[in-house]
Amino acid sequence: MAVSSRRPPRSRRAARVVIVLLALIWTQFPFGSGGASAEGGHELALCCAWGKSLDDANLTYNVSSPDPASTQVIRNAVEEWDGDLPALTLTEVPVGSPADITIRFTPADGRTEGQAVTSFTRRGLISKVEITIQGALAPANSGGLGQIAKHEFGHALGLGHTNYEGNLMSPAVSPDPQPVPPCVIQGVIEANRGKMTDPQGKRPAPPRVSQVAC
Ligand SMILES: [Zn+2]
């Protein structure tokens, strides 16, 4: 959690913190270098929990992209997350209408990259996430696009990074398609525990733990 709650508010309601997380696709994936930190073991950091947007167990998203095939790859990535999280529904809405999570794809030469910019309420809960992805088009780049989209959406759901290489949520992402790992799904549930394990439950609250084994 960023420690900027003492920053002077820009306005009464805009006293919010923003976190930016950047990811890259490795062109040569460093297999075999997946050693954990000496003391800790394999862990996935939890960033934060959604605020009241999650009260209805639904988050909305839209995908802004000039290329239909690439749009579909990104949409498939979100739909995979949707299927992985029975306690939550992810609903696509048209570009231009309000969405909890916006995803913008910009075709570009070179390495596939993604960024998630997360905005928070004053209580440190997620209020909005803006994902940007750039890279080559599908179908040639379907693997890279899909994996980056799943990775960034993981941030949008409250995750940080793993402390080792080779996981979907490692800072550098493999372009080889792989399902969202079970420990990563568990991380999202833990991050949003208040709402995702007890839907009737209390007010949303930040994660109780800062990481899960992964
Ligand atoms: Zn990342």
Image (cartoon, rainbow, N blue to C red):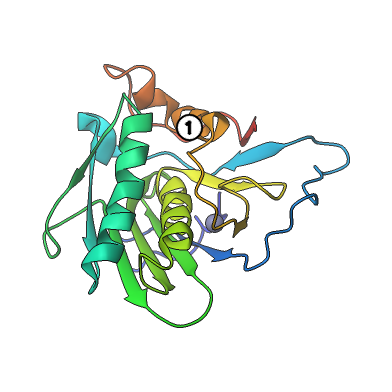
Q: For ligand 1, which image quadrant applies? A: bottom right
Quadrant occupied by the C terminus: top right
Which residue is rendered at x = 61% and y = 42% of the image? Answer: 45
**In front: 200, or 10?**
200
Decide: few, some or many residues near mark 1? Use Cα within 10 Å; few <14, some 14-19, many ≥20: some
39 sits to left or right of 103:
right
39 sits to left or right of 106:
right
Vertically, is 15 above or below 86?
A: below
**In front: 30, or 102?**
30
Specify whether tag 1 is near ligand 1 (CB below 8 Å): no
Q: Residue furthest right?
A: 38
* Residue 33 visible in the shown view: yes
**In front: 148, or 1?**
148
Percent across and percent down for residue 127 are 32, 50
Percent across and percent down for residue 164 are 72, 47
Vertically, is 183 above or below 66?
A: above
Which residue is rendered at x = 80% and y = 42% of the image? Answer: 36
What element does badge 1 sit on?
helix
**In front: 110, or 57?**
110
Percent across and percent down for residue 8 are 44, 66
Identify the residue under disc 1.
Answer: 185
Q: Quadrant of residue 56?
A: top left
| Residue type, numbered disc 1 | Ile
Vertically, is 167 above or below 130?
A: above
* Residue 13 visible in the shown view: no
Q: Quadrant of residue 87?
A: top left
Tally the numbered discs.
1
Q: Quadrant of residue 88?
A: top left
Which residue is rendered at x = 62% and y = 51% of the image? Answer: 170
